[in-house]
Image (cartoon, grey):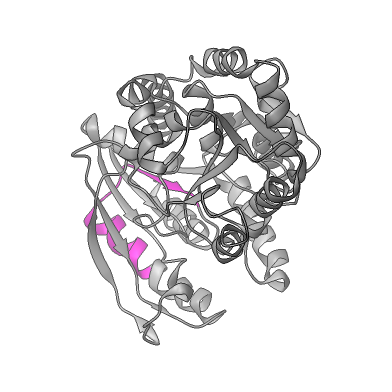
Amino acid sequence: MKILVVQESNWIAKGPHQSHHLMERLVQRGHDVRVIDFDILWRRAKDKSLISGRKVMTAPPKVIPGAEITVIRPAIIQLPVLEYISLLYSHRKEIIRQVEEFTPDIVVGFGILNARLAITQCRKRNIPFVYYIIDELFRLVPQAWLRGIAKHIEQENCRQSDLVLSINEALKEYTLAMGAPSEKAHVIPAGIDLEWFSRSDRERKRKELGIGPGDLVLFFMGWLYEFSGLKETALAMRNGKDTHHVKLLAVGDGELLPDLGAIQKSDGMQDRIILVGWQPYSEIPDFLAASDICILPAYNNEIMRNIVPIKMYEYMAAGKPVIATKLPGVMKEFGTGNGVVYVDHAGDVVQKAVEISHNGGLTHLGRMARHHVSQNDWARITDEFEHMMKGALHAG
């Protein structure tokens, strides 16, 4: 199959997300994939021009060696709001160009505006369009006053797509509420690669990071959002009782990094908060192995309420207990008795971790977590996704 992907995030700088895992595995299987993306990170660039010109790039593989994907980034005006107006023009032009030159068999959308543009072109040419929901998209729009418009467009996308996929059951219910026909709505969950963790080296990485044998290491990876709960976790480490042996290891970048850095510099915290920034995906198993408990202390807000981050599956596949706040999507997906322990607030994570450690529950909870996700092998998930794609293609 020739597969065209449209999304409104930076394919190269962000992730790996569900899209990277699936598309790189499809490339490995001989399918041809192209991506039209949008540099959502343009605001963070130190030196930026008014207009960012069209770029054609080869994305370095994130998860599958050799699975290179061509990424086309249309031109945009790099000013708030005007970025969206320019996107409507440049992405429409690029989608038409790729439909005519690349001649995709199927189009997969992960965004809002360019998904709307792609659906219009697919309808004209009888090309199946698959909408893949991994977030409640309209809630991610930075400008609150635009979210109502974004929601309306997302609803139309759900109604008019040939197939609507979600990464978990809670998001499937969301797509149904947004208008997706029930017969077209399905779940393709996140996958894991158990072999990926067999190459990890716990002792080497702990020594490299200055972690002692008596330290209890809490691990988080991903974008450091302000609502990630890591600030509250760090403060609980600093201010809590019997927490002197607890360390926080965070892999990632984001707007919360300066606050965490400030706490790290406070008395007694220099060696207890370990911030290593973004790391190659191939290095993640070692960081996971070096940890004792993985955490998802996010706020229960509109953005996080119904999603299940892919890192949850990777935490569990690594055989680590997970402490998470009571996010409805996560609780619906994993329930209880599967290696995930829930707390009411981010500030409760540290004491719960100490309690689990003192009770000797680390190994038992870790085994339960790994067992629960052991059936989510990426090969099986990719088989299912590939089968649904071919089904949509034949139905068209």
In percent of the image, x 55 and y 58: which residue is there? 112
For the N terminus, the quadrant is: top left
Residue 373, how many percent across, how many down? 53, 19
Image position of 107 (left or right of 235):
left
Residue 188 appears in the figure: no
Residue occupying the far left of the picture: 66
Image position of 253 (left or right of 269):
left
In percent of the image, x 63 and y 19: which residue is there? 339
Question: Is 100 part of what is drawn in magenta?
Answer: yes
Residue 383, how many percent across, how many down? 38, 22
Residue occupying the far bottom of the picture: 50
Res 265 → quadrant: bottom right
Q: Give the number of callouts.
A: 0
Res 294 → quadrant: top right
Residue 279, how many percent across, how many down? 36, 48
* Residue 12 to residue 142: above or below: above
Residue 193, how many percent across, how many down? 38, 24
Report the magenta residues as a range.
93-110
Q: Nearer the viewer, residue 340 or 392?
A: 340
* Residue 271 to residue 394: above or below: below
Image position of 324 (left or right of 376):
right
Res 180 → quadrant: top right
In percent of the image, x 43 and y 28: which residue is there? 289
Residue 68 appears in the figure: yes
For the C terminus, the quadrant is: top left
Question: Is 335 part of what is drawn in magenta?
Answer: no
Image position of 143 (left or right of 42):
right
In percent of the image, x 73 and y 26: which residue is there? 355
